[in-house]
Amino acid sequence: MIRYIRAYLRAFAETVRFEPLLVPVAVLLAVCMGAKPFVNIYFSARIVAELSGTPETDALVLLVAVCLGLNFLLQLLQDALTPTFYMLRSRLYEKERMAVEHKLFRLDFAKLEDSSFQELVHLHTESMDRIFSAFVQLCWMFKDFLTGLVTLVCAAALIWPLLRLGVTKTGDGFLHSPWFLAVLGLGIAVSVVVILHLSGKTSRIWFHSNERYGRLNRLFRRYRDLLADYNSGKEVRLYNERPLIEKEATEQLLSKGEVILRETSQQSAAASAYIAVVGALVGFGVYTFIGAKASLGLFDIEALVRYIGAFMQMISGITAIATTLGRHAELLPNLEYYFRIVDTKSDMVYGDKEIALDAVEVEFRDVWFKYPSAKDYTLRDISLKIGRGERLAVVGRNGSGKTTFIKLLCRLYDPDRGAVFVNGVDLRDLSCECVTRLFSVVFQDFKLFALTVSENVACGEDADERKLAESLKSAGVLERIERMEKREHTPLYKDLDRDGVEISGGEAQKLALARALYKDAPVVVLDEPTAALDPVAEHEIYKQFNRFVEGKTAIYISHRLSSCRFCDRIAVFRKGALVQHGTHDELVCADGEYKRLWDAQAAYYIEELAQ
Ligand code: ADP
C-alpha cells in the first residue's frame, strides 16, 4: 500500500513537473462534468413542482432560463477546457518519451546494451503504444475519479433530506424501518468492494494479456519491418524469405495473439456483466427505498424527481470511482517501467580532469575485460603503449578482441581490471566532454543518419565550409557530393526525405571517414576503414593516410596486412591476448601469429597470381 501511495505521489509530482497546468485543468473539467447533471436534476424537479401546482408563467420561464443558462455556461467551459486538456495530454506524452530518450542517451554504453535493460525499454515502448502514456492515463484516472467525487458530493447534498427521512420518519414493516436504509447502505458498500475487485481483476487481466500480446506484436513488427525495409529487401527476395517471415509473423500474431485477446475479452466481458448486475441490484434497492418513503407521503413530486435523479447519479458516481481505482492495477506497472528506466544509473562515473588535446600518448596497463553478458574475458592482460603521434596497426583473426580493444580505448566500456591512461591520466578521471573530444573513430559497423551530408559530417554543428570540403576531399568523396543537386545539403537516404540520395557502401564509408577527419581529434581510430572501398579508392586512402593522421596518434585495424606497413608498429591479438608487437619486419621474421597470418595471406595472393 505504502509502495502504491509513494509511486502515485511521485507520478503526480512528475506530471506537475512536466505539465503544471494539466492538474488544474483536469480539476475544472471534473467539476464541470460532475456538476452538470445536477443542474438538470435540480431544475427539472423545480419545474415539475411548478407545473404540478398552479403554474406561474414568470417563475416557469425564469427556471427554464436559469437551467438553460447554467447548462450553456458549464458546456461552454467544458468545451473550452477539453481541447486544452487534450493538448496538454499530448505534450505530457511527448515529455514522457523525451525523458526516456534523454536517459537512454546519457546512460553508459554497457548499461544500454544490457539485455534486461533493453527488455525494460521494450516494455515501456509497448506500454506507450498501448495506453499512450502512463502519465496521461494517470491524468484520465484523476479526472474520472474527481468527476465521480463531484457527482457523489452533489448527489449527497441533494438526497441528504431523504436520508434523514430514512432514519427519522418510519412506519410499519421493514421497508419503512431505519434498517432498510442500513441494509441499503451496506449493499452500496459491498457493491463498491465488488466493483473495485472486479475492475482491478479486469485491469490486471488486460495488463498481462497486453504484455503477452505486446511481445508477439514486437515480433510481428520486426518481421513486417524486414519486409518493408528496402535495405533488407534484397535478402528477403533473393532467398525467398517472405513465406517464412509471413508465416512466422502471421502465425504468432494471428493464432496465438487471437487466443490471448479472445480469452481476455471473455474474462473482461464477464466482469463487466457482473458490475452491471451489481449496479442494477443497488438501483433496485434505491428505487424501493424512495418508493417506500414516497408511499408514506413524506415528500412532494418535486422532491421525488430530485431524489430519484440524485440517487441514480450517486450510484453512477460510486461506480465511476470504484472502476477508476480498480484501473490502477494496470497503470502502476506501466508507471514503474518509466521510473525504473529514469532511475537506472550509469555505472560509469566521469572525473573532472582535462588534458591538452594536441598530441596524446595512450597506455593500456594490465587490462582485463569481460562483456556484461559473457562468461569469459574478451581481453586478457593487455599492456601496450602507443606513443604521441605513433601509428599502430592492430591485427588478428575475427573475434580476437580488436574492436573491443578500441571500445575500451574510447571508454564505451571500463576495464574490469587494469586501466587505460591518456597522457598518464586514467581515462576514468577525465571529464565526459574531454573523452568525447579525444577520439575520431570509424567503426566497421559505422552509422550514417538520414540527415544532410553536411549534418552527417559536421555532426549537427554549423559546418565550417572550408573544413567540410577538405574532409570530403581527403576522404575521396567530394566529387560525388558536388555532383549532387543540393551538394553538401543533400539529404542522405529516403527514410525521412523523398529527395534523399541513396549512396553506395563505399561512399558511405568515405563519408564516415570524412566525419572522423572533420572532428580532427588527437586520436584517430580506423576499424577496417577500406573494407567497402574499391582498389583505386583504397589506394588513394592509403596514400593520404599519413597526411590524415599527421601529428595524431593513430590506430588502424585491418585484415589486409600489407596495408599495416604504413604503421610504425603492429600489435597482434589472438583470443583476447596481445601475443606480439613490433614492426612489420620484426614480426614477419619471428615465428608467431603474425607470420602465420602473413603467410596465409601471401599464399592466397600467390594462388591468385598463379591462376
Ligand atoms: P574482432 O574485432 O577482433 O573481430 P571483437 O572485439 O569484435 O573481435 O569481439 C571479440 C569477442 O567478443 C567475440 O567473441 C565477440 O563475440 C565478443 N563480443 C563482441 N561484442 C560483444 C558484446 N556486446 N557482448 C558479448 N560479447 C561480445
Image (cartoon, rainbow, N blue to C red):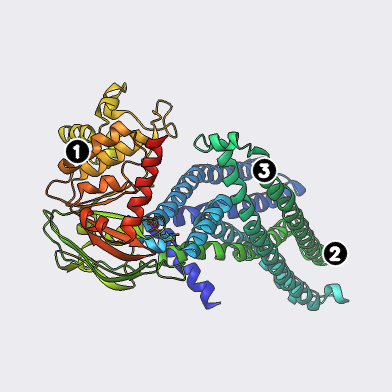
Q: Is mark 3 on a helix, strand or loop?
A: helix
Question: In this orientation, which residue lies closer to the viewer: 84 or 417?
Answer: 417
The answer to whether 133 appears left or right of 526 in the picture is: right
Marker disc for residue 244: 3
Q: What element carries label 1?
A: helix
Residue position for label 2: 295
The residue at the far front in this view is: 610
Which is nearer the N-term, disc 2 or disc 3?
3
Looking at numbered disc 1 in the image, what kind of residue is underneath it?
Gln
Query: In the image, residue 121 lies at what x, y percent?
Result: 49, 58
Q: Which residue is drawn at 29% across and 31% down?
A: 536
Residue position for label 1: 544
Q: Residue at x 63, y 45 (%)?
A: 63
Quadrant location of the N terminus in the rendered image? bottom right
Which is nearer the N-term, disc 2 or disc 1?
2
Q: Residue at x 70, y 44 (%)?
A: 247
